[in-house]
């Protein structure tokens, strides 16, 4: 299997409803909740690509371009964007959809860095 095939096969998509218990006093999704969901999708993507123990080492940049209101649906999409020897980057985008219309927009974009580790928590090569 080629690297391109592995990247394609590891793309991760998760849908969630935005309920009031995940929103702030503006009735929009908490930024920290969005970051939590993004890190989880990035972790799943990195693990599906490498099939190794992966740990988050940084979030490089997260841009909140649009508020995500309560009562909407979000889709989180994770894609491997860079592969190093022991590390990789995963780009995650959050799209917001209105529940009762076809309206859909990109709301948040971020990138997360991961390192592959062995049973002793030491970095190991991603590509075997």
Image (tube, grey):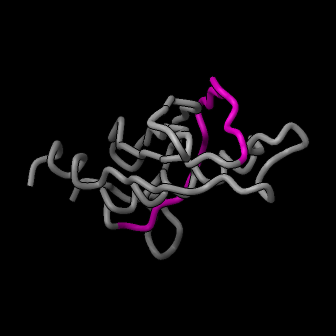
Magenta stretch prevailing secondary structure: strand
Give x and y (percent) for residue 72. 62, 46
Query: In the shown orientation, is residue 70 left or right of residue 126?
Result: right
Left/right placement of residue 90 relative to residue 57 reads left
Q: Residue at x 33, y 45 (%)?
A: 85
Relative height, residue 20 to residue 65 (above, below): below
- Kindly tell me whether residue 29 is visible in this rendering: yes
Instruction: Examine the structure image and report whether residue 17 is included in the region drawn in magenta.
Output: no
Residue sitting at 62 percent across and 31 percent down?
Answer: 62
Question: In this view of the protein, which residue sits in the foreground, 92 or 81?
Answer: 92
**Is residue 58 inside the magenta stretch?**
yes
Highlighted range, magenta = 52-70
Q: Is residue 18 left or right of residue 30?
A: left
Closer to the camera in the image, 13 or 18? 18
Identify the residue shown where x is 20% and y is 52%.
6
Quarter of the image with the N terminus in it: bottom left
The percent position of residue 56, horizontal first and vertical second, equals: 56, 53
x 24%, y 54%: residue: 127
The C terminus, quarter of image:
bottom left
How many numbered marks are there?
0
Q: Is residue 94 visible?
A: no
Q: Position of residue 75 (x, y in %)?
A: 48, 47
Q: What is the residue that sits farthest to the front in this orientation?
A: 100
Farthest-out residue, bottom? 119
* Residue that sits furthest to the top in the current view: 65
What is the quadrant of residue 22 in the picture?
bottom right
Residue 13 percent across, percent down from the top left: 40, 53
Residue sticking out furthest to the right: 25
């Amino acid at each position: 299997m080629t690297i391109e095939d592995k990247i394609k096969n590891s793309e991760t998509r998760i849908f969630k409803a935005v309920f009031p218990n995940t929103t702030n006093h503006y009735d929009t999704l908490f930024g920290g909740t969005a970051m939590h969901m993004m890190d989880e999708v990035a972790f799943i993507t990195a693990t599906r690509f490498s099939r190794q123990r992966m740990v988050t080492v940084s979030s490089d940049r997260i841009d909140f371009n649009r508020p995500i209101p309560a009562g909407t649906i979000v889709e989180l999409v994770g894609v491997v964007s860079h592969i190093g020897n022991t590390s990789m980057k995963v780009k995650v985008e959050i799209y917001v959809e209105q529940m009762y219309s076809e309206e859909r927009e990109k709301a948040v974009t971020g990138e997360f860095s991961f390192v592959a580790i062995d049973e002793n928590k030491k970095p190991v090569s991603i590509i075997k």
